Amino acid sequence: MPKIAVDAMGGDYAPAAVIEGALLAARDLDVEIVLVGQIEAIERELAKHRNPPP
């Protein structure tokens, strides 16, 4: 499985748009995504995409 590093802090709407795209790519493609950037900002954004407990 290929590994792709993504600058999560790059772009006008980062990190939200970058992380959303990375999650879609990880779901739809056979790749491993490594997000690079400010850990706190990345974790905060990823938390928005986690499934809530039942």
Image: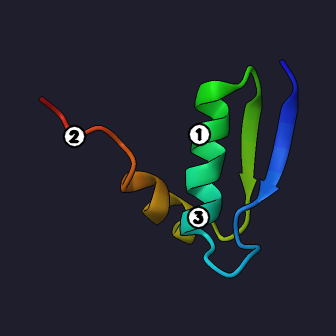
**Cα–Cα gap, marks 3 and 2:** 21 Å
What's the mark number on residue 52?
Answer: 2
Percent from the top left, x then y, of residue 11? 74, 76
How crowded pointer 3 is (Cα within 10 Å; few <14, some 14-19, many 20+) is rated as: some
Q: Which residue is mark 1?
A: 24
Q: Amino acid at mark 2?
A: Pro
Percent from the top left, x then y, of residue 25? 67, 37
**Cα–Cα gap, marks 2 and 1:** 18 Å
In this view, 37 is above or below 6:
below
Q: Quadrant of residue 29?
A: top right
**Secondary structure under badge 3?**
helix
Q: Quadrant of residue 37?
A: bottom right
Q: Residue at x 59, y 39 (%)?
A: 24
Quadrant for the N terminus in the image: top right
**Cα–Cα gap, marks 1 and 3:** 11 Å
Drawn side of residue 41 relative to residue 35, left or right? left
Q: Residue at x 77, y 27 (%)?
A: 31
What's the mark number on residue 34?
Answer: none
Q: Nearer the viewer, residue 33 or 21?
A: 21
Q: Amino acid at mark 3?
A: Ala
Q: Nearer the viewer, residue 14 or 37?
A: 14
How crowded pointer 2 is (Cα within 10 Å; few <14, some 14-19, many 20+) is rated as: few
Q: Residue at x 47, y 62 (%)?
A: 45
Quadrant for the C terminus in the image: top left
**Secondary structure under badge 2?**
loop
Drawn side of residue 29 relative to residue 41, left or right? right
Q: Which residue is mark 3?
A: 17
Q: How many numbered circles does the render carry?
A: 3
Q: Quadrant of residue 38?
A: bottom right
